[in-house]
Image (cartoon, rainbow, N blue to C red):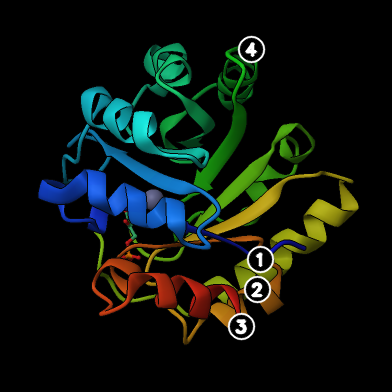
Amino acid sequence: MKRLVAPSVLAADFLKLGEETDMLNRSDADWLHIDVMDGVFVPNISFGFPVMKAIGARAEKPLDVHLMIVDPDRYISAFAEAGAEVITVHYEACTHLHRTVQAIKAAGAKAGVSLNPHTPVAVLEDILADLDLVLVMSVNPGFGGQKFIEKTYEKIARLRQMITAEKSSALIEVDGGVNAKNAGRLYASGADVLVAGNAVFAAADPEAEIRAIKGA
Ligand code: DX5
Ligand code: ZN
């Protein structure tokens, strides 16, 4: 298993996005997590292509794009063209998930599927072998700075067993309320990638916080 960290730019200072991106370039961060919200799938609106493209032009690391939007099929090629290396859609937003996953791959990106806290990992059994990543939400999507849901540990462990059984190469990513205190147990439960927003950007020393999460 890997121990990757993907800071969520949603928690960055938007007036200093260039400096924040430079900080992530210098840091031990592996990916930049980009949260796209449409105000329909989740009760919040974040940012779209112009902001993502500006970050991508400055970033020296892969953009890990988390689409919290309805009908994501409409935008897959646009996100791939805008520089997304990983495109993650929500299970709950896709009626024909298999088709959506194939479209992400055809666009040249890695395909991820995210599960809301109430959605059991078992629903992915028949598509797991096709996925590059499963994003387990450890808060209800829509906002940064929420409290981590403890049930997540056992979901990760169950998902890890399923991935082994299906001989899938999917990475497990965890998103929401992650910090240096719970990171160790999350990696130990089977997570490969931890997303952290507020823990990183509200820290006095964000680069040290990224190192602390990675080394937890
Ligand atoms: C929540 C987003 C998260 C969020 C994480 O809907 O998907 O990526 O930015 O923020 P923290 O780490 O502050 O919970
Ligand atoms: Zn996210």
N-term-proximal mark, 4 vs 2: 4
**Mark 4 vs mark 1, CA separation in Å:** 28 Å
N-term-proximal mark, 3 vs 4: 4
Residue beneath label 1, please? Answer: 3
Q: Is residue 57 left or right of residue 117?
A: left
Tell me which residue sits at (81%, 62%) in the image.
Answer: 161
Q: Residues within 10 Å of mark 2 (few under 14, many from 20)?
A: many
Q: Residues within 10 Å of mark 1 (few under 14, many from 20)?
A: some
Judging from the image, what secondary structure is the residue with disc 1 in?
loop
Pointer 3 with pointer 2, Cβ within 8 A: yes
**Furthest residue to the left?**
15
**Mark 3 vs mark 2, CA separation in Å:** 6 Å
N-term-proximal mark, 4 vs 1: 1
Residue beneath label 4, please? Answer: 106
Badge 4 amino acid: Ala
Judging from the image, what secondary structure is the residue with disc 2 in?
helix
Q: Is residue 96 above or below residue 123?
A: above
Pointer 3 with pointer 1, Cβ within 8 A: no
Pointer 2 with pointer 1, Cβ within 8 A: yes
Q: Residues within 10 Å of mark 3 (few under 14, many from 20)?
A: few
Q: Is residue 150 above or below residue 104?
A: below
Q: Is residue 31 left or right of residue 93?
A: right
Instruction: Point out the image quarter for the C terminus.
Output: bottom right
Tell me which residue sits at (58%, 38%) in the image.
Answer: 112
Q: Residue 185 has which mark?
A: 3
Residue 185 seen in this snapshot: yes
